[in-house]
Amino acid sequence: MARSIVATADAPQAIGPYSQAITLDNLVFCSGQIPLTPAGTVVEGDITAQTRQVLGNLQALLAAAGSSLGQVLKTTVFLADMGEFAAMNAVYAEFFPADPPARSTVQVARLPRDVRVEIEAIATRS
């Protein structure tokens, strides 16, 4: 089994001792993405703006790994406030318009840099 680290300047750099993503054969494991720009600035604004940035970051990581959002098998969404579920879900549906992946969504007490959303993903790659 071939394990390799995925790193791209098109998504925020890791802010701790972890990799942006790891591939293992045809699987891609993306670390949780928060609404940081590739330059490391937190995207201010409501849950829709933050969710859009997070999913864009995942898209960039997956592309760097030879995958895409269409190949995502499972996501986990972490929300600071479950009251924002519907707004997050509307943006999420834009990125996964057909045959969406399996998903878990949980409310957490706090997220890094006090953002509103974090999403991690597992995907296949060609």
Image: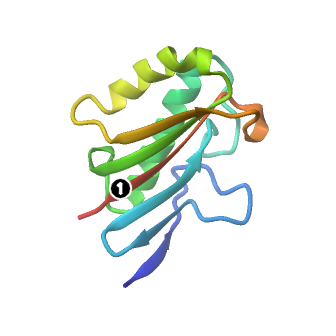
In-image side of 19 versus 86 (left or right): right
48, above or below 110, in the image = above
In the rendered image of this protein, does residue 75 appear above or below residue 110?
A: below
| Residue at image point 49% right, 28% down | 52
Along the line of sight, which residue is nearer the eye, 10 or 15? 15
In the rendered image, residue 60, in percent from the top left (x then y), is placed at 44, 49
Question: Which secondary structure, mark 1?
Answer: strand
Task: Give the tally of numbered discs.
Answer: 1
Rendered residue at 76%/35% (across/down): 110
Residue 109 placed where, x, y %? 75, 33
Residue 111 image position (x, y, % from top left): 72, 38
Where does the N terminus fall, quadrant-wise?
Answer: bottom left
What residue is shown at x 72% (from left), y 66% (from top)? Answer: 17
Q: Which residue is mark 1?
A: 123
Residue 92: percent from left, percent from top? 41, 28
Nearest the eye: 58 or 74: 74
Task: Check the image and report above or below for 102 versus 117.
Answer: below
Q: Is residue 64 left or right of residue 14?
A: left
Q: In the visual, does 88 lie left or right of 24?
A: right
At label 1, the amino acid type is Ala
- The colour scheme of the drawn protein is rainbow
User: How many other residues sit within 10 Å of disc 1, few (<14), some (14-19) or many (≥20)?
Assistant: many
Residue depicted at x 26% and y 28%: 97
Locate the C terminus by quadrant: bottom left
